[in-house]
Amino acid sequence: MPLIDEADLLDGPVPGQSLTGEVGSKPWEQPPKLNTVDEAVEHYVPMFNDEEILSGMLSHIEAGVALTTMADLITKGGVMTGLHSIDVGLMVAPVLVEMMINVADAADIEYKVGTEVKKKEGTTKASIQAALRDTNEDDIEVVELPEEAPVVTEEPSMGMMSRRGV
Amino acid sequence: MSKHIRKLYNRVDSQVRSTPKQATPSKGLVGKRGASPDKEVDPVVDYVKYIRELREGKHASN
């Protein structure tokens, strides 16, 4: 299934469209309101006391959304509304992740930080070698395969006279 | 940006783990005599450390 409908793709912005607007007309083109990490933390931490926000957040955590992804969305929202710069958003994200871990722990919900190392499924060269090392050589039965009669195939002659017969 | 956040979180996490849980209390200037020169403390690391301590305290009380 395609992620984006073709019609939506055509409704998207034209490359360079953002440069056609008045400079400073967008919130993120204005000077940010929160300039330091401390100010950003002061802005975001009370959010974790809001029941409405908290219930939505917990439902997302329960659904398996990684906490780093959620922190990314929250900080991106802050950048879009002109609250802070991208840099401050990036700096405050680990604090948000920790706060979300606190919230998830308090609600006794399993969470995914997003930094977990993915285990590769299937066999790898190393796993095959380890399995071979573990097996005793005496345990391996040698099965003799029945000899097959060699198949003789005649090579077609490439001479000029052979064409006439074909 | 999510990738950068993951990287930064890992770095902050390793920094928090590497620092001792409770710094030795300094007693005025005398206590600082043998101490290493002032390091720039990352506020993010401080915040994360503080939040973790809060969490551990909550776990301990339960």
Image (spheres, coloured by chain):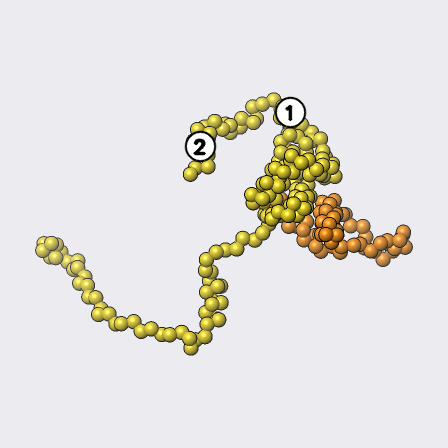
Q: Is residue A130 visible?
A: yes
The residue lying toward the viewer, choosing from A3 and A17, is A3
Under mark 1, the amino acid is Gly
Instruction: Give the drawing colour for chain A.
Output: yellow
Residue under the image location 27 percent in, 72 percent down: A146
Looking at the image, residue B31 sits to the left or right of residue A100; the answer is right
Residue A150: image location, x then y, percent: 22, 68
Under mark 2, the amino acid is Asp
Instruction: Using the rendered image, report if marks 1 and 2 lie on a common chain.
Output: yes
Q: Disc 1 is attached to a residue of which chain?
A: A
Mark 1, other Cα within 10 Å: few <14 / some 14–19 / many ≥20: few
Location of residue A1 with respect to A29 vertically, above or below: below
The residue lying toward the viewer, choosing from B49 and A15, is B49
Residue A164: image location, x then y, percent: 9, 54
Residue A10: image location, x then y, percent: 45, 28
Residue position for label 1: A24
Q: Which mark is residue B29?
A: none
Q: Disc 2 is attached to a residue of which chain?
A: A
Q: Which chain is orange?
A: B
Residue B38: image location, x then y, percent: 81, 50
The residue lying toward the viewer, choosing from B16 and A31, is B16
Residue under the image location 49 percent in, 67 percent down: A130
Residue at the extreme bottom: A138
- Label 2, secondary structure: give it: loop
Mark 2, other Cα within 10 Å: few <14 / some 14–19 / many ≥20: few
Residue at the extreme front: B62
Looking at the image, residue B26 sits to the left or right of residue A75; the answer is right
* Image quadrant in which the N terminus of chain B is located: top right
Residue position for label 2: A5
Looking at the image, residue A106 sits to the left or right of residue A120; the answer is right
Q: Earlier in the sequence, mark 1 or mark 2?
A: 2
